[in-house]
Amino acid sequence: MTARSLLLAAALLLALPATALAQAREETIAVPVLRGNVTVESEIVRVGDLVENAGTAAQIAIYRAPDLGTTGSLPTAQVIAALQAHKVIGVDTKDIKAVSVTRLARTIEGKEIDSRVAQALEHRKGLGDAANLSLTFDHEVQDIRLEASTSGTMQAASVRYDPRNGRFDITFEIESEVSAARTRLRFTGLAIETAEVAVLTRNVERSEILKSADVVIERRPKAEIVGDAATRGQAVGMQMRKQLRAGQVLKLADLGKPDLVQRDDGVTLIYETTGLYLTMRGKALDGGAEGDTVSVLNLQSKRTVSGVVIGRGQVAIIVAAPRLAADRPRPGGGRPSAALAPALAPGGHAKSPGDGTTRCWPLMTTLPIGGS
């Protein structure tokens, strides 16, 4: 009985290590599993990128990666065959029909390149602000894709500009996270400084009033702008001093205040002084804008007088009337009768501020407004 117990115990002791070893091996060996979507940064796709739990085969290069920033698709059967060729077997495909492989990249857009070049040229050898520079590249600038690890900013390493012909030659450098080598980008072309100007949308004649639809804002080379260019706000509502064609740049010298009085138009002559306001009809002998001095024919006296345009169809007559003896204080005190004031308005209308009434008076001989 004792011998049999000893033999059984020995058998159990021998069986335990084998059972524990098998259990440990089962726990450490994981089934390789195929991935359906793969992203890579390098130009090589490795077994470990495609298969989870690839073990020692993970670093084996198996495919060339797609172009930077693009995605490729591999049929599952083709992937499994390539894996088996490298002794990777028993891969669980999870019923995946195809594997999608995307290569990561950093994209620098064309508009960013344009902005960086303009900033590098700003205020260089007579150039103005970057926002006012118009760039024409020797080769069309398109979006550029770089390795995802190239994460540094674009730094201008070399900037050349010739003001005689506007040519530029600029080289940028970009640092990498994984390499000491820097990516270099070179751009050449033509830089022209521009300015915003008001441009006509149609042909206009002399004396025309510009409307909002007649003027647009465009950028034109600064070197082509002669004289003081007008802004859109300065042009709309103004009167043309000369004829211009559509597309021409408007200058301040081309514009003037709109005529409020036109030649040969009927106008209202206005004479105002302390205690007196007179109006008469006249005919403009000149055209003029507000503040201009024009000649007007007094239709009643047939004499020509000068006045200042104060509104549409209105001309103010300014008369430096001498001080009359009647205006002086009388020795015995008192003032001349107010009935003398209407004599200044033969055939016109006089308004007395004192009583707020307007009276008509017969034609008299004294008339400061072109009277005889």
Image (tube, rainbow, N blue to C red):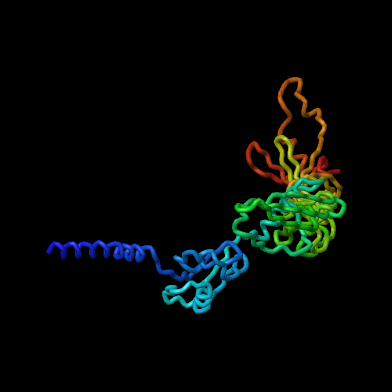
Using the image as rendered, state which of residue 28 and residue 313 is in the foreground. Answer: 28
Image coords of residue 214 (percent x, y): 74, 61
Image coords of residue 292 (percent x, y): 81, 46
| Res 11 visible | yes
- In the rendered image, the residue lying farthest to the left is 1
Image coords of residue 67 (percent x, y): 62, 68
Question: What residue is at 78 percent from the left and 29 percent from the top?
Answer: 326
Question: What residue is at 82 percent from the left and 63 percent from the top?
Answer: 245
| Res 312 visible | no
- In the rendered image, the residue lying farthest to the bottom is 77
Quadrant of the frame with the C terminus:
top right
Using the image as rendered, state which of residue 170 and residue 243 is in the foreground. Answer: 170
Image coords of residue 235 (percent x, y): 75, 54
Question: What residue is at 54 percent from the left and 74 percent from the top?
Answer: 73
Relative to 249, is 339 above or below? above
Using the image as rendered, state which of residue 264 and residue 54 is in the foreground. Answer: 54
Picture quadrant where residue 148 is located? bottom right
Relative to 284, is 90 above or below? below
Q: Is residue 266 left or right of residue 358?
A: right
Q: Is residue 244 left or right of residue 278?
A: right
The image shows a total of numbered marks equal to 0
- In the rendered image, the residue lying farthest to the top is 331
Quadrant of the frame with the N terminus:
bottom left
Question: What residue is at 81 percent from the left and 60 percent from the top?
Answer: 248
Picture quadrant where residue 6 is located? bottom left
